[in-house]
Image (tube, rainbow, N blue to C red):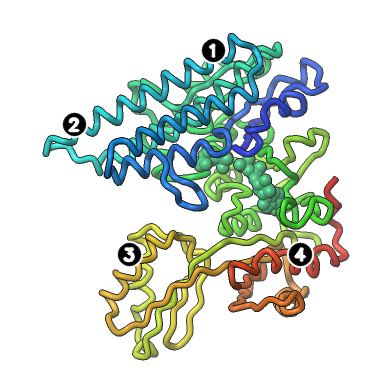
Amino acid sequence: MTHTVEKIGGTSMSRLAELRDTLFIGDRATSEVYNRVFVVSAFAGITNLLLEHKKSGEPGVYALFANDDSNHKWQDALDRVAEAMKAAQSEILTHKGDIQQADLFVDERILGARNCLIDLQRLCSYGHFRLPEHMGHIRELLSGLGEAHSAFVTTLMLQRSGVEARFVDLSGWRDEGDVCLEKRITSAFDGIDPATEMPIVTGYAQCVEGLMNEFDRGYSEVTFSHLAALTSAREAIIHKEFHLSSADPKLVGEGAVRKLGRTNYDVADQLSNMGMEAIHPKAAKTLRQAGVPLRVTNAFDPGDPGTLIDDQPADTAAAEIVTGLDIVTLEVFEQDMVGVKGYDAGILEILKRHNVRIVSKTSNANTITHYLDASLKTMRRVERDIAKLFPAAEITSRRLAMVSVIGRDLNGLSVLTRGLQAIAAAGCEAIGASQGPRNVDVQFVMDRASSETVIKALHAELIENAPTRLSRAA
Ligand SMILES: Nc1ncnc2c1ncn2[C@@H]1O[C@H](COP(=O)(O)OP(=O)(O)O)[C@@H](O)[C@H]1O
Ligand SMILES: N[C@@H](CC(=O)OP(=O)(O)O)C(=O)O
């Protein structure tokens, strides 16, 4: 096969009209327009409204429906989704006929979802049917609305510009079959010839495994990687709003950050652990196993080759990325812990039960500290369960931040020492710091209020001042 499979994230999707003139068409000859399959995310913010906010946890339709205290709340939230979808498409579509078609599409899908949820509530008012058993399906149904919408709008926009674009809806809308992810993708691609048409594929794919159930947020990269692997793509490409850079350009400055020319899956894994999702870890695995090379590019800089991600080690040691994450530390202190086994296992079991993501951990004789990515509401439940299991323990949760310095090879760079000095010189305090013997990341923990200053200070010390061979971002 000679085609590529290319994914566009939500932030970039919201600038779709610009993408038409750079990524999709630009100054390409007709022959260069095709042999590219696009997988799209929902427009920025839509999945947050449908499910819950990815960062703040603010409830969307799903979360409101799940704690259904009043019928109005989730219904109003669904209305807000429709409004946001229509607002997004009005920025992109210019032809009246297209806008009308897209409005109808939104109305039809939102009405369908609304009816489905109402019917389910009615059914579950009978004792034999339990709402909790269906929540997984509801989450799947709602997720799919966002990507179906964005793919539909993208197709309309491209067709209006003369591209043979084809809407490929993997969301299973009103579909009867129970199919696995592989079948869902391969049967949708039956009869599609990427050489003569451009498939615009929904980032959500309905399947018996349940995409949300298995992979949760960031699922569009899972669809993307499977599609690339199953169709033996020449290359899998993720288009982002910026070049994959040594730090967030919005925070450190576009002029100060460096573009990553190349990195490996080890670094990509550390980035997703820090919530940065350079690529979903499960998606990286699929591509790695299928031997499909991965590239991350700036969607708005089409002439640039971007960052190649493979499984190769670095030629020279270097700090590559500085990135931060708000975390909650869970400290369990018990004097009797010293020399006794089983405390850690007990805590882990509780964290697993509450589905809490562990970012990192440290322990000593009588204290186990987990650095977690969790809401305070979940933390209260976790603390309650730990108190029940270890009644004599002192349990403390604190809202802090973690900043991590990541690179394929950090050996010999004294990242920990230089990092602590840079943090102190910037007038901040490191509450914790850790580095493992494998030396691909060094983590610093501090107050949330100082995390941005720390990112800038570490970036200046370890990347801007480093004599690396990374090139500057254009
Ligand atoms: N190291 C980094 N390199 C590039 N962008 C980064 C980095 N860290 C954070 N970002 C931020 O990530 C944001 C979203 O990136 P992107 O992956 O394009 O989102 P999406 O998947 O929603 O399209 C950008 O607006 C940028 O500010
Ligand atoms: N919009 C979905 C799917 C996705 O993966 O989006 P993005 O590519 O913008 O992370 C989500 O937020 O989970």
**Distance between the alpha carbons at the discs numbered 1 and 3:** 47 Å
* Sequence-first disc among 4 and 2: 2
Q: Position of residue 61 (x, y in %)?
A: 39, 38
**Distance between the alpha carbons at the discs numbered 2 and 3:** 30 Å
**Distance between the alpha carbons at the discs numbered 4 and 3:** 37 Å
* Amino acid type, label 4: His
* Amino acid type, label 2: Leu
* Left or right for 187, reference 138: right
Q: Nearer the viewer, residue 84 or 317?
A: 84
* Left or right for 278, reference 371: right
Q: Mark 1 against mark 3, which lies toward the viewer? A: 1
Give the residue pinned by disc 2: 123
**Distance between the alpha carbons at the discs numbered 4 and 2:** 56 Å
From where the camera sits, is residue 246 visible?
yes
Q: Position of residue 351 (x, y in %)?
A: 38, 64
- Which residue: 25% across, 44% down? 132
* Sequence-first disc among 1 and 3: 1
Q: Nearer the viewer, residue 126 or 31?
A: 126
User: Which disc is residue 66 wearing?
Assistant: none
- Which residue: 77% across, 43% down? 306
Image quadrant holding the C terminus, namely top right
* Amino acid type, label 1: Gln
User: Which disc is residue 459 wearing?
Assistant: 4
* Amino acid type, label 3: Arg
Give the residue pinned by disc 3: 381
From where the camera sits, is residue 221 visible?
no
Is 219 rendered above or below residue 345? Answer: above
Quarter residue 315 falls in: bottom right
Element type at mark 2: helix
